[in-house]
Image (cartoon, rainbow, N blue to C red):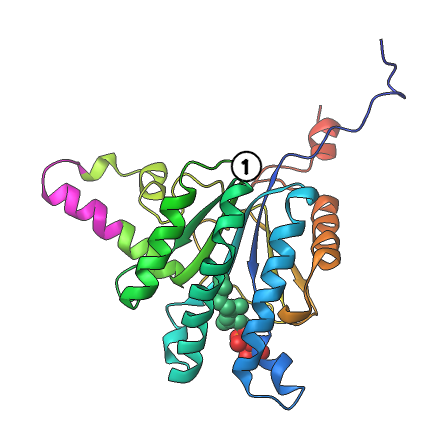
Amino acid sequence: MATIDQQQPAPHAPLHVAIVMDGNGRWAKRRGLPRQVGHPKGVDAIRRVVEAAPAQGVRWLTLYAFSTENWRRPAGEVAEVMRLLKLYVNSDLDKLTREGVKVRILGRRTGLPPDVAEIVERAERQTAHNDKFFLQVAFNYGGRADIADAARALAAEAAAGRLQPGDITEDLLQSRLSTAGIPDPDLVIRTSGEQRLSNFLLWETAYSEFVFQDVLWPDYGADYLRAAIEEFHKRERRYGGAVADDVLAAG
Ligand code: FPP
């Protein structure tokens, strides 16, 4: 029998890490290049992180790629982000499929150009039966819009007589969000030194830990991810409860 000293530390539970990939524009500007030149470099960072995440105990990875507010950017930059999403799916989908990655796109489908909507559906269809790793890309996503859409869906069900207002619980509302079935993020990372949530996963981050890293997204990779996860493991999560030591002291 193993003595206490010989016991291994309990392995960490698989993590859901969500990332606000910020700083592509500044990365380009610092080099005297047009802002949108930063975005393809951002896609390279996405590849590095998707590659590194499973070995670091991450099972769900959610990336904020395009918000409902990002339509206000110059048309050329919006077109570039759309082009890069299509390019990424076209070039990486078969590899992701072989590696057991399930891809899901969070956010509103209406409003996406038809060719982008089509490719997003293909990515989801082709990987629907995978379950080794879960990659969510928030695209045309806004946390408030997602909650409003869920409320509207429940209201429609109530108006049709399939639901009573008293039936609406947190779990039921959650089941109508675009993140339905995905565990809440344990850790939210934002790069570039900004410290805001910017309408990302508003409902789902109620008890998430936040780590802000002073690195522009195109420079991100495995070592930064490891540092953020190490910082996360130092934190004590209480979910509204008391500190474990205080509970013991209170007897
Ligand atoms: C943030 O930098 C980055 C974005 C808003 C776009 C992220 C999109 C991609 C990397 C490409 C497409 C997505 C996929 C999934 C292939 P910023 O432009 O806000 O930078 P700034 O804050 O320095 O201006």
- Identified at 79% across, 29% down, the residue is 9
- Identified at 70% across, 54% down, the residue is 228
4 left or right, relative to 115: right
Residue 125 sits in quarter: top left
Q: Quadrant of the N terminus?
A: top right
Q: Position of residue 70 (x, y in %)?
A: 41, 74
> Which residue is farthest left?
160
Is residue 12 in view?
yes
Residue 67 sits in quarter: bottom left
> Which residue is farthest bottom?
32
Q: Main secondary structure of the magenta part?
A: helix
Q: Is residue 121 magenta?
A: no
Up the image or down, 105 lies above or below 11; here it is: below
Residue interval drawn in magenta: 151-164
Up the image or down, 41 lies above or below 243; here it is: below
162 left or right, relative to 198: left
155 left or right, relative to 73: left
Mark 1 CB in 8 Å range of ligand 1? Answer: no
Q: Residues within 10 Å of mark 1 (few under 14, many from 20)?
A: few
Q: Is residue 155 magenta?
A: yes
The one nearer the camera, 70 or 245, is 70
- The residue that mark 1 highlights is 132
Q: Position of residue 191 (x, y in %)?
A: 63, 66
Q: Position of residue 144 (x, y in %)?
A: 36, 60
Residue type at mark 1 is Lys
Q: Position of residue 177 (x, y in %)?
A: 35, 48
- Identified at 49% across, 40% down, the residue is 183
Up the image or down, 206 lies above or below 112; here it is: above
> Which residue is farthest top?
1
Q: Quadrant of the C terminus?
A: top right
Is residue 210 in view?
no
Tell me the element at label 1. Answer: loop
